Image (tube, rainbow, N blue to C red):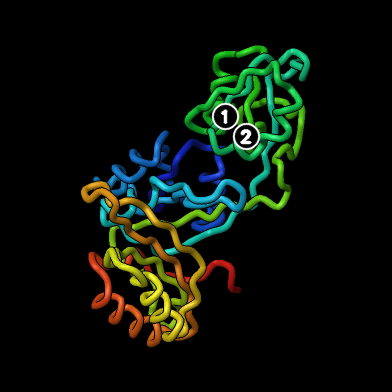
Amino acid sequence: MNLKVAIQGIKGSNHHQVAKEYFGNSIDLVECLSFDVLVDRLMEGNADMGVMAIENSIAGSIIPNYNLVYHNNIHIIGEHYLSIHHNLMVLKGQTLDQIEEVRTHPMALLQCKEYLRQYPGIKLVEDVDTAETARQIQQKQWKRVAAIAPKVAAELYDLEIIASEIQTIKNNATRFIILKRQNKALPETEINKASLRFITDHKRGSLATVLNVMSDCNMNLTKIQSLPVIETPWKYAFFVDMTFDKYEEFAKAKSLLDIMSEDFRVLGEYKNALVG
């Protein structure tokens, strides 16, 4: 039986590409048109794993996804980095000067901002997914409408690429996290990265003290993101990614952070994808 993998988007999307690269081709896709639905499918048991974008090298963090992972008590069991390539595609026979509207995911619009500024007369429309827009153009035979999507979407939905590699920064990558209902899919000897969430005391130096503890335990902080605690105004939770060489040192840091902070939780322990 194939592994059921939930993705945000449909076949031909960047999430689909990550699912194939991480799990191989022998998977059954569970297509979801929002991250909330992706989490629902995972929690309901309709998917074994989930693939979720969490941050982009240009646009930064996808902040709501941190809270989705935390509030649903899902676990990060892996990560994957994907180089992003955006292409402008249309029904075959359409030309750039005929285009009146560009539709795509808001993140893709943001990442192609400089290219699109050349065409102020074109209306920019946010859509749920890059590949879904490409599919809609083909299914509904939309003329004068272009999609921004990966090259594979043009192949799948028989569209013509009229401008390639239109992302503002060519070295553009997105980090995806691999989700599961249970934690730790690897033995401790293979784990060298972790994602944590905690709240510090609302007093001067609290965060600095926590960061010093991480440093003393030889943790390398690769990401820190603060988010407001909705239930408590002016209180903030911190989402932290850290890498380490020895699991024993991480275990020590974990024990200390549990004592020093409030509502401490390990969101995932996994392998650093940037290390071979």
Q: In the structure shown, which secondary structural element does the residue marked by tag 1 occupy?
A: strand
From the top left corner, tell me how far across and down residue 3 is, in percent. 40, 53
Q: In the structure shown, which secondary structural element does the residue marked by tag 2 occupy?
A: strand
Dots 2 and 1: beta carbons under 8 Å? yes
Tag 1 residue: 104
Tag 2 residue: 149
From the top left corner, tell me how far across and down residue 104 is, in percent. 57, 29
* 113 shown above or below 274: above
Of the two numbered discs 2 and 1 in the rendering, the one whose residue sits closer to the viewer: 1
Comparing 126 with 15, the one in front is 126
From the top left corner, tell me how far across and down residue 48 is, in percent. 34, 53
* 219 shown above or below 148: below
- Can you say which quadrant of the picture contains the C terminus? bottom right
Q: Can residue 40 be seen in the rendering of this structure?
A: yes
Q: Residue 258's quadrant in the figure? A: bottom left
Question: How packed is label 2: few (under 14 Cα within 10 Å), some, or many (20 or more)?
Answer: many
* 157 shown above or below 51: above
Labels 2 and 1: the sequence-earlier one:
1
Position of 56 with respect to 268 (left or right) is right
Q: Residue 21's quadrant in the figure? A: bottom right
